[in-house]
Amino acid sequence: MVNISEFASSLGLSRSTLLYYEKLGLLKGDRQLNSYRRYDEGKPPAIPS
């Protein structure tokens, strides 16, 4: 599990793009107790074309 910035960097996307995808329901990050999002590196988002 990685944080949103690390996940975005590994995909070549910006953090704000991932937040937008999450808002659209294309991506779901697990929330920790401190409200930080964590993502599974093996599950890239369904990126719209």
Image (cartoon, helix red, strand yellow):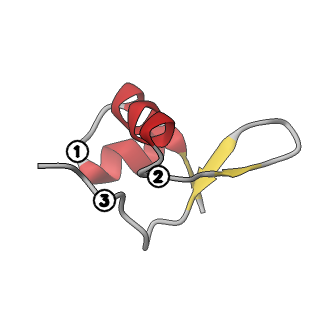
Mark 1 — residue?
12
Choose the circle earlier in sequence order: 3 or 1: 1
Q: Helix, strand, or loop for circle 1?
A: loop
Count every numbered label the image shows and give the total: 3
Asked whether the residues under the numbered discs 3 and 2 touch, taking CB atoms below 8 Å apart as contact, a structural biologist would say yes
Tag 1: residue type?
Answer: Gly
Calculate the distance from the C-alpha at mark 1 to the C-alpha at mark 2.
15 Å
Seen as rendered, the residue at the extreme right is 33
Q: Helix, strand, or loop for circle 2?
A: loop
| Viewer-closest of 39 and 48 | 48
* Residue at screen point 30% across, 59% down: 46
Give the image quarter of residue 44: bottom left
Sort mark 1 into few (<14), some (14-19) or many (20+) by Cα contacts within 10 Å. few
* Residue at screen point 71% across, 38% down: 36
Mark 3 — residue?
46
| Viewer-closest of 18 and 24 | 24
Q: Is residue 41 left or right of residue 8?
A: right
Calculate the distance from the C-alpha at mark 3 to the C-alpha at mark 1.
14 Å
Choose the circle earlier in sequence order: 1 or 2: 1
Mark 2 — residue?
27
Seen as rendered, the residue at the extreme bottom is 42
Q: Between label 1 and label 2, give the one nearer the viewer.
A: 2
Q: Between label 3 and label 1, give the one nearer the viewer.
A: 3
